Image (cartoon, grey):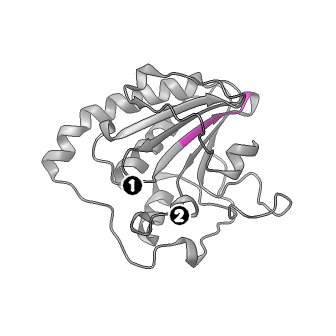
Amino acid sequence: MPPKNPTVTPSRYLSNTPRDTPQFSRETQLSATPAWSEFRRNLATCIAALEEDEILIISHKFSPHYVQFAGLGWHGTRAEAASNAFIDAPEALLSEQQYQRMDRIGWHRATFLPDTPITEAVVPGSPNFFADAPYQSDMKALATMAVRALREVYGVPHPGMLSYVAFHRNGTSLRFPTLRLLREMNTEVTIRSGSVESA
């Protein structure tokens, strides 16, 4: 994984109210562990299957949090996770403590803001949390980082609370039934990242 780029964490994109990741009982967490393990394995397989210009977005059904992946052909695979720049609901904004947790998981922080002119953007980078994997590499690491972000930072208690949408840049819809998630049929999906959108 490449070294971290200079980070951008302006105060207007960080929650001013300290907020811990939602906590669930130990019983709830333990009962969901097998489901998360299976989901992580299936996700790694689906990420590895992404071809150039194919995008997979996995979202929480009840919050604006998401992770997304883009196939970049010979350039590998880009993974991104929602930063506060793309979270509109005040109650869903991430705290500095949650940003630090993303650091520890291995995500790179955003390097520019969504409205930054392309000529001023720090590249390679993103207005989201991001990570890259080389072409034809093992995607288990990216899948693990995504699952940890969903569970430990975004507070998703079970993969059954997730849905997905997948498509090619030409508009063709894609299916990944092995994810065993609800497939969204929204044909007007907005790619929530300047880097994935222009990669």
Q: Which residue is mark 2?
A: 84
Q: Which mark is residue 154?
A: 1
Question: What is the crowding at mark 1: few (fewer than 14 residues within 10 Å), some, or many (at least 20)?
Answer: many
* Residue drawn at the location 35% of the way across and 49% of the way down: 151
Instruction: Decide which of 138, 153 is in the foreground and name it.
Output: 153
Q: Is residue 182 left or right of residue 24?
A: right
For marks 2 and 1, the one nearer the N-term is 2
* Residue drawn at the location 61% of the way across and 75% of the way down: 10
Q: Is residue 38 left or right of residue 28?
A: right
Q: Secondary structure at mark 2?
A: helix
Question: What is the crowding at mark 2: few (fewer than 14 residues within 10 Å), some, or many (at least 20)?
Answer: many
Q: Give the extent of the magenta segment.
A: 68-73
Instruction: Decide which of 114, 73 is in the foreground and name it.
Output: 114
Q: Choose top left, top right, bottom left or bottom right for residue 71.
A: top right
Q: Choose top left, top right, bottom left or bottom right for residue 69.
A: top right
Quarter of the C terminus within the rendering: top right
Number of numbered discs overlaid on the protein picture = 2
